[in-house]
Amino acid sequence: MIGTLLPSTAVLVAAAVSMSACAGSPTSDTRPALRSPAASPTAHTRPSPPPATPRNDSVADPALLAPLQDGRPRRARLSIPALGLHDLLVVPYRGRTDDAPGTWIQDRGMGASPFGPRGGVGPGGVGNYQITGHRTSSTHPFSELPSLRVGARALVVAGGVRYVYEIRRTRETSFRSPRSLAEQRAAVPGRPGARPTRAFLTLSTCSTQEDHAAGNYWSDELHNPEHRIDKIGVLVRTVVAE
C-alpha cells in the first residue's frame, strides 16, 4: 500500500519514522554514561558548577517519558545546586541501605542506590528512590547534606531524562531500631506497608558528628554510626536532559 501514497504523504511517513527512531528504545541502556570533563566518579568536586536548572523547563510529551519512569534501576548522575554538588555518579545495586555492597560503593566516592525486595526503585519510579553517600570519609560527597533545606531541588539524570525532586522534610534513622529502618526503606518514606502513588527520593548520610557530640560512639560491623540523616523529596518535574 505504501507504493500508492502521494509523494507528499510518503515524505510525511518517512519523517515520522525518522522521529520515532530518534526517540530510542526505553529499555536500551546503550547511551554513554554522563561524565564531567574530568571523567571521574568524583567529578562532583569540579570548581565551576553549572547554573541551576531553570524552573520553567518545558515538560516533554508524557507518552515519550512514561517508559523511562518505570523505576528500573540504572546508573545516574545526582546534582544538588544548593549544596554545590554536581554530577555525582550514583550506582544501583541489589540490597538494602548501607549494607556491605552499598558501603563498598560509597567508599569509592560514589552514591549507592539499593533496589530489590529490601531496597527501593530506580530514578523517577513510583516508590522510594534511595541514594546513600558518605559525609565524613572517602570524597564525602554528602558532607553538606544535613543543611539541605525544604524546597531545595535535587536533580537526577538517567537514560537521557532529568528527574527534578523537591525536598519536603528531614527524618532521622536509627540503625538499632528495626522500626526506624523499616520507615527509611519503605516505599512511602516513614510509612511501612503503605502503597505508593508518587515518586519519592531519600538522600541519606551518617550522623557521626551529632552522635559523637552526644557521647554515642556505637557503630555496626561496617562502621556505620547509629543514626543517619535522611532528606525526603518528591518528584515535581520530568524533562528531557540536554
Image (cartoon, grey):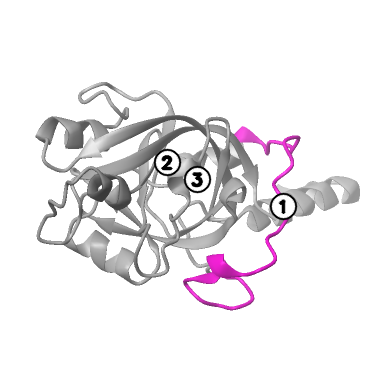
**Do labels 3 and 2 touch, CB within 8 Å?**
yes
Q: Is residue 52 magenta?
A: yes
Q: Earlier in the sequence, mark 1 or mark 2?
A: 1
Classify residue 140 as left or right of residue 53: left
Q: Which residue is mark 3?
A: 68
Classify residue 5 as left or right of residue 62: right
Q: Which residue is mark 1?
A: 19
Q: Which residue is mark 2?
A: 70
> In the image, what residue type sits under mark 2?
Asp
Quadrant position of residue 146: top left
Kindly report the secondary structure that dominates the magenta region of the rendered protein: loop
Q: Is residue 199 above or below residue 78?
A: above
> In the image, what residue type sits under mark 1?
Met
Q: Is residue 224 above or below residue 165?
A: below
Q: Is residue 114 above or below residue 110?
A: above
> In the image, what residue type sits under mark 3?
Leu
Q: Is residue 150 magenta?
A: no
Does residue 120 appear in this view? no
Q: Which mark is residue 39?
A: none
Q: Residue at x 72, y 52 (%)?
A: 19
Classify residue 69 as left or right of residue 132: right
User: Which stretch appears magenta?
Assistant: 34-62
Q: Residue at x 11, y 35 (%)?
A: 178
Q: Residue at x 28, y 59 (%)?
A: 93
Q: Element at badge 1?
A: helix
- What crowding class fits label 3: few (fewer than 14 Cα within 10 Å), some (14-19), or many (20 or more)? many
Q: Which one is in front in this view, the residue at disc 1 or the one at disc 3?
A: 3
